[in-house]
Amino acid sequence: MNASADPLRVLSLRSRFSSWTPLSDNSCNLHLFEDRVDLVLRWFDLWTDRQRKHLMASLLGRCTSSQLRCCRDLLMETLPVARLDLAAALPRVLSLKVMSFLNPRDLCAAAQVSWHWRFLAEQDCLWEGRCVRRGWFLPYSPGPREYGAWKSHYVACVSTL
């Protein structure tokens, strides 16, 4: 029998890396690829949770950055990440420390994010130091439950400049 007459032999001669993947026939490539995907998915359905996780870890370890971004986007569509309010999740002391690095304009913008952020951004400990450094002192002593006195004083002093 002639080699050119045997379709399997001709197909194997046009293959590279895998005897299953003909390079020159795009429609055949697509069909074979879809068949292989279906086969892997059928296997995947039969595997245990541990085996599935192992396969996913192995595949992700071989992915390029672009492919990983695609996976991330697919996951975000499938399982939207709950938005975590760090100012509410962190202890108050840490939240105030983070906010202490903001300038006054950014602090005022942060106060508009949510009730919790507003409560933190109006804490006297964030505004008192800014006022005192500029020589602006309150003409009275704020009460223990009075919030935002130093911020109000800061805003009033800046508006007179």
Image (tube, helix red, strand yellow):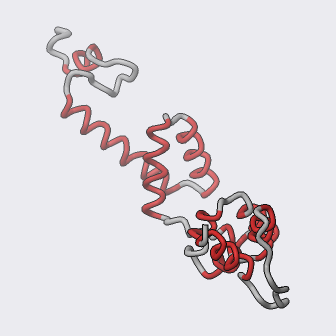
In this rendering, would 53 be left or right of 153?
left
- Residue furthest left as drawn: 5
Nearest to the observer: residue 74 or residue 141: 141
Percent position of residue 53, x then y? 60, 51
Percent position of residue 1, x then y? 18, 10
Nearest to the observer: residue 25 or residue 138: 138
Q: Is residue 19 above or below residue 141?
A: above
In this rendering, would 18 be left or right of 55?
left
Which residue is at 24% across, 39% downward? Answer: 31
Picture quarter containing residue 98? bottom right
Picture quarter containing residue 88? bottom right
Q: Is residue 2 above or below residue 86?
A: above
Which residue is at 42% across, 51% downward? Answer: 41
Which residue is at 19% across, 17% downward? Answer: 6
Question: Which quarter shows the C terminus?
Answer: bottom right
Picture quarter containing residue 126? bottom right
Nearest to the observer: residue 137 or residue 15: 137
Percent position of residue 145, x then y? 80, 91
Percent position of residue 43, x then y? 47, 50
In this rendering, would 148 be left or right of 27?
right
- Residue furthest front as drawn: 161
Which residue is at 77% across, 89% downward? Answer: 146
Nearest to the observer: residue 83 or residue 50: 83
In this rendering, would 141 be left or right of 77?
right
